[in-house]
Image: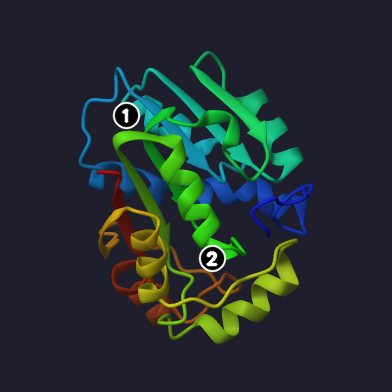
Amino acid sequence: MSQAANTITTWYVDPDAEDRMSDGHAPIWRHLIDLIAERDLSQKSVLDFGCNQGGLLRHLYAIRPFHKALGIDIAAQSVAKAEAFKGNIPVQHAVGGTLEDWVGEFDLAISHEVIYLVEDIQAHAADIFKALKPGGVYYAVTGCHTDNPLWPKWRELVAQRTNTVVQDRSISDYGRAFAKAGFEVSGRKLEYDGFIPFSEDGWTPDFADALDYYTQTKIVFRLVKN
């Protein structure tokens, strides 16, 4: 996916898998929301970069209502579903991969398992930096990095199951890219503390791998525009 990304229909080749993704991610989103240091979002503008079907913003609004939000994604059919599902919450959805129309717009930005698909991570970092207000914060979450022991296998699965192209980057590669864009960079392990369901044919069929992935491998960058 380039920074001037062409649109796709859905992330997953199998549309049913796309529809199931929100259910699988929901507990992780709730855990992530609890980690976000900014507690009162009632006067804040929020960005979900790579919003898919909009589930993260709907969860966020239910837990910490925000003033307004944008969900943007290159998957056109997924964005259409996000718009259909949003109800009356103050969210706008857009199809695209860049934010040139929203310079200085957001107090808070979030992406969940998106940055490993961005071809030009430096351009993405600069794009988010410009879209944030001074003091704005970007939480970028991924377990898809070369420090993940499952990564060689996952690269093949992503190629087979999705309409996307993965990029090979380490945790430090991400840190350098965001620092170069001007962010104050910090991070932590996600350390998901809920129960993790067993799945025979998921991304981590070895249950021990699944337990390690969600507690040790998946990371959260906190990136501040100072």
State the SS at label 1: helix
Q: Residue at x 52, y 81 (%)?
A: 151
In this view, the residue in front, 145 or 209, is 145
Mark 1 to mark 2: distance in Å? 27 Å
Q: What's the mark number on residue 116? A: 2
In this view, the residue in front, 107 or 101, is 101
When the figure is inspected, residue 56 is found, relative to residue 45, above or below; the finding is below
Characterize the local packing of mark 1: few (<14), some (14-19) or many (20 or more) Cα atoms within 10 angstroms: few
Q: What's the mark number on residue 63? A: 1
Amino acid beneath label 1: Ile
Q: Can you tell which quarter of the image residue 14 is in?
A: bottom right
Q: Can you tell which quarter of the image residue 63 is in?
A: top left
In this view, the residue in front, 24 or 134, is 134
Q: From where the camera sits, is residue 162 visible?
A: yes
Q: Residue at x 45, y 40 (%)?
A: 130
Q: Residue at x 68, y 55 (%)?
A: 17
When the figure is inspected, residue 134 is found, relative to residue 7, above or below; the finding is above
Q: Position of residue 65 (x, y in %)?
A: 34, 22
Q: Position of residue 181 (x, y in %)?
A: 40, 56
Q: Position of residue 56 (x, y in %)?
A: 47, 39
State the SS at label 2: helix
**Direction from residue 195 to residue 82 in the image, left or right:** right
Q: From where the camera sits, is residue 195 visible?
A: no
Amino acid beneath label 2: Tyr
Q: Position of residue 59 (x, y in %)?
A: 42, 33
Q: Quadrant of the N terminus?
A: bottom right
Q: Residue at x 52, y 37 (%)?
A: 55
Q: Quadrant of the C terminus?
A: top left
**Direction from residue 174 to residue 167 in the image, left or right:** right
In this view, the residue in front, 9 or 124, is 124
Q: Can you tell which quarter of the image residue 77 is in?
A: top right
Q: How is the image coloured?
A: rainbow
